[in-house]
Structure formats: structure tokens, C-alpha cells
Amino acid sequence: MAASRDVPVNLRSARWFAPRDLFGFLHRTALRSEGLSDASISERPVVGIANSHSELVNCNLHFGALVEGVKRGVHQAGGLPLEFPTISLSEMLMKPTTMLYRNLMSMDVEEMIRSSPLDAVVLVGGCDKTVPAQLMGAASAGVPAIALTGGPMQPGNFRGRRIGAGTDIWRYTDDLRAGRMSDGEYAELEAATRPGVGHCSEMGTASTMAALTEALGMSLPGSAAVPATDARRGSLAEDTGRRAVEIAREGLRPAAILTEMALENAVTVLAAVAGSTNAVLHLLALAGRLGIDLPLERFDSIAARTPVLTNIQPAGEHLFEDLQRAGGVPALLAELAPLLHLDALTVTGRTLGENIGGAEVWDRDVLRPLDEPLLPSGGLAVLHGTLAPDGAVLKAGAASTELLQHRGPAVVFDGIDDLLARIDDPDLAVEAGSVLVLRGAGPKGAPGMPEWGMLPIPRKLLERGVTDMVRISDARMSGTGYGTVVLHVAPESAVGGPLHAVHDGDEIVLDTEARKLDLCVESEEIARRLAARPLPEPPFRRGYGSIYLDHVLQADAGADFDVLRHRAEEDGTEPYGLLEGWISGW
Ligand code: FES
């Protein structure tokens, strides 16, 4: 391959643009036709910008301005920015759930990076699943990558109260159902809830993933909690663009950053912020992409030693933007320093410990000290037992203390339609001590594992003042959700997990202290019931849905596809997965 004098041949893009032959000619003409000069094409690292902007995703609506900032930074550092769209996932609008499409988006990101002449990529994501999909795709593609998250939206205001976009809404909706709020007030709330762009303002999935991305070392220090509309986010975009050019030149690939140490740091932060249980799935999937052993049990052992430090909804009172005011994620990491792997390399080229040097805490009500935490431990608990042989997850930090040890009879719902049809039936046989069970809501069952796990409290109990019950399902829960809600039961009902065998009235024991979740039915009887009860018909027989059902793994493997997990035998065989002949051709 003959290289141009002007192109550093170690750049990946040089394989497209450097050859002075027909193929180089054709590749260059593609960009020349966009009005780019030869100097733009042949002298610069090419930085792709994966933009998850979509008018279907309100949280990501401001990405146009962010991407312009990234481009300014790339130009400043001597690179060539090339923006490209990927599919995007709207937590609010996609049905049955964005989780059905997280793996699809990750494949879009991975294949766009792999197949294109990119030396580095900036991942611009915000709404819940967009960030993990981008991280998973970039990890699999292996090209240098840096993330820029979109920042939280400003809080709403309702009747003199500052409100978040999710947690407060669940509470007000219970007020409406219990007759404590009028339809008119509820309509007023609807108009006030989401006053602008940016992701949900509590420690929901998006805020959790933004904080974890910074803790993983994949975004710039201090970037996660800057509000979406804050001018500082524009300059962060420039900084990210400049750094993208540098990692292109350095060849700093995601695998060097996303190590076991980095993943453990992320789990520590997840526990310390009492973050979204969805992040458990995303970190499990990310580890699987990298060939890193990160069993579910590790989440439990790390959570057990990690106090909850952030006083942010749903576990606390404040919003994610308040963490920025209190010093941002660097201040949180500095507080957690004794529990972190400070040697972990980050996208800055420095270690995590070097990144957080000098971080200070400005508001101790928002960010508590390690020796005076919001909760001593237990932002998260992983349960096992006869009802969940492969595990289940409880956001213990947002649960009712008095329900963490509980025994009660099951009230079983087979899927969301059954739940919606019966939950408010005045004749439903349910008491405050009952255990609400929803099945048919797992990765294959629903399908896509929707956020149905925070089952509504039956209206007749709400009216009696009941605000929490033990609820168990193979579903997920919104990161803004709360309550004594056991999620991600594996194996799920649709593949014949024990959840499939529960009958109304069966006793269930939740013993959080012992990390147990048991169905009090003899194992022979469970086996007999499972053999007698057919599995549901697959909901899809064609298209992506059919592919999804063929390949999706259970919750304890992050609900990733089996074919997307790391394959050790491919390590080092084909840099970036591209054969030479594939580029020198048309
Ligand atoms: Fe997009 Fe919550 S709906 S982050």
C-alpha cells in the first residue's frame, strides 16, 4: 500500500485515504464531494461522532449544539470530524420497551464504527439506553472512543415545589389513584414535569449511566452532572472533541480503559449513588463484551461494603444537577477513594486517582462523607433462592426498611394485561402483607424486559394508606422508581424459571439480610407444576423480534445477545475486524 506523505500511516483512516491508487481515489472522492479539501482529508485523524439525536427522543433533542461543540474541538486539535446518525431509543415513547432495542442500537454503533474510516469516535448519548448501547458497541468495535453524555434536564416546578421527572410523578400518580389529587391538578402537573431538554433529573438510569461512564473513565472528569442547558456543557463538548483527536493519535482503545478495575469502580459508584438497577444489566452486558468475569455476586459484595453517599432521589431528596453543585462526580469519587481502584486508566490518559486530585465537596447535604453516609450500605442487594436460582436484584436503598425481611402470600399476575385488568378490582384478594408477583415480563417473556416491576399498589390498599408492598417480577424498574421491588428474577418465567410455577397463596420469603428469595413450596411440587404448565408461544416469528428471541440471554448475563459477547479466539487476529481486502475494494 503506497501511503501519502501527509498521512501518519499508523492511523486507521490511512487505510482508506492514503493509497494513491484507484481505491484511495474512490475513498477520497467520497469526502471531496462533501466539499472537503485534500488537506482536510489527508492530514488529519478522522473522528466519528455517533449522534443519537432524534425528534422521537426528547431527552437528546439538544445534541445538535453539543455535536457542533465536539466538531469545534476536533478542528482545534487538527482532526476531521464526521458526524453520523445511529438509531436512538426513547424511554418515553418506544414500546414495549427500549430494552428490546438496546442490543440493536449497540450493533448499529459497533458496525458503523467498524465499517467506517474512523480513528476515534465520540459517543453522544443521554436517554437511558442510548449510553449503554454506545458503550457496548464501542467496546466491541475496539476503536478509540470517548463518551459525552447529555446532562440532566432542569427541574420542573409544581405548586411551589421543585420536582423531578420521574420519582415525584410516581408519587403524584398514587395520589390521583387514591383520590388525593384532582384530574385538573394532574393535567397541571403534566405541563410542568419536563420543562426542557436533557435526561431525567433524578438518579434514574440516565443519571446513573452518566455517573458510571465517568467512573469507568470513558468520559471527561466532571462532565456527567453538568445540566443539559448549562453553557459549560458546550465547552465540555469542545474538550471532548480535542481529546478524541489525541486518543486517535495515541491509539487508546476502550479495552485499555474498560478493565475489571474500571468495572468494579463503576459498581462501587452504582452502590454509592443507590443508582438504577438497570445499570446492573448494562454493566453485566459490558463485561460480557470485554470477556471480563463480573458475576452478579460481585455487585452484592461491593454494595455491602459501600455506603450510599448521595442524597438524591429516589433514595434521597435532591436531584442529579445538585451533585454538580456539590462538586460533581469527581467529588463523589474522591470521597469514595478508599474503595476504588485509583490506578485505573481513563480516557484522559491519566489514572482515575490523578483525575480526581483536588476535587472538593461544596454541599454536604447532597454528598455525604464516607464516615457519615446517607445509608451505611446496601444501595443494592442481590438475592438467590428457590424463586431465583440465577439471581434477582433489589434496590435496597430505595426500599422500605420494615419490608426488607418479609413473608407473605403471593398474588400472581400473568403479564401486564392481567395486571392492569385486576390490580384495582375491589374484589382482588390482597392485603398489605401480600406479595405481588408479576411474571411473563422478562427478556423473552414480555418481550424485552420492560419497566413493569414497580407494580402499582392496589387501589383499595392505597386508599387505606398503604404506600409500599413487596413486589417481585422478572421485569425491570425505572431508575426513578422506588419501593420494596425485587427485579430481574432469573431464570424468567417464559423460559420455565420457578416464577412460572407460583400459585396464588404460595408463601414467599424475602430475607434481604441473608440475601434469600424463596418460594415456600417443595421442590418436587415446583418441578411438577413446571412440567404441567406450558411455556408461552413466542411473541415474534419474523424480523428483528425473531432474531432477538433466538439470541437474548437472561438477566444475569445482562440480557445481551449470545453472539455479541466477547470471543477470546478472535483476540488479536484481525485489528478492528477488517481484512485488508475489504478496504481495497468497492
Ligand atoms: Fe430519557 Fe428519562 S426519559 S432519560
Image (cartoon, helix red, strand yellow):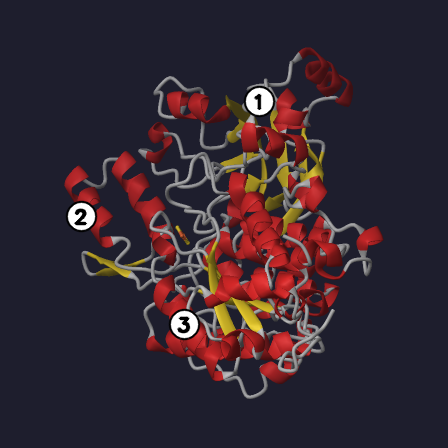
Of mark 1 and mark 2, the one earlier in the sequence is 2
Quadrant housing residue 252: bottom right
Q: Position of residue 106 (x, y in %)?
A: 58, 50
User: Which one is in front, 85 or 348?
Assistant: 85
Q: Secondary structure at mark 2?
A: helix
Taking the spot 76% from the left edge, 54% from the top edge, the residue there is 291
Q: Residue furthest left?
A: 184
Q: Which of marks 2 and 3 precedes in the sequence?
A: 2
Answer above or below: position of 427 versus 40: above
Q: Position of residue 506 (x, y in %)?
A: 61, 22
Residue on which disc 2 sits: 188
Identify the amino acid type marked 3.
Val
Q: Tell me the residue at 81%/53% (across/down).
A: 570
Indicate the position of residue 131 as horizontal and vertical percent values.
52, 57
Q: Looking at the picture, does residue 476 appear above or below residue 321?
A: above
Q: Which residue is mark 3?
A: 226
Image vertical order of residue 390 relative to residue 240, above or below: above
Q: Are marks 3 and 2 in contact (CB under 8 Å)?
A: no
* Few, some or many residues within 10 Å of mark 2 (<14, 14–19, 20+): few
**The residue tagged with tag 3: helix, strand or loop?**
loop
The residue at which mark 1 appears reads as 541
| Label 2 C-beta lies within 8 Å of the nearest ligand 1 atom | no
Calculate the distance from the C-alpha at mark 1 to the C-alpha at mark 2.
Answer: 43 Å
Q: Nearer the viewer, mark 3 or mark 2?
A: 3
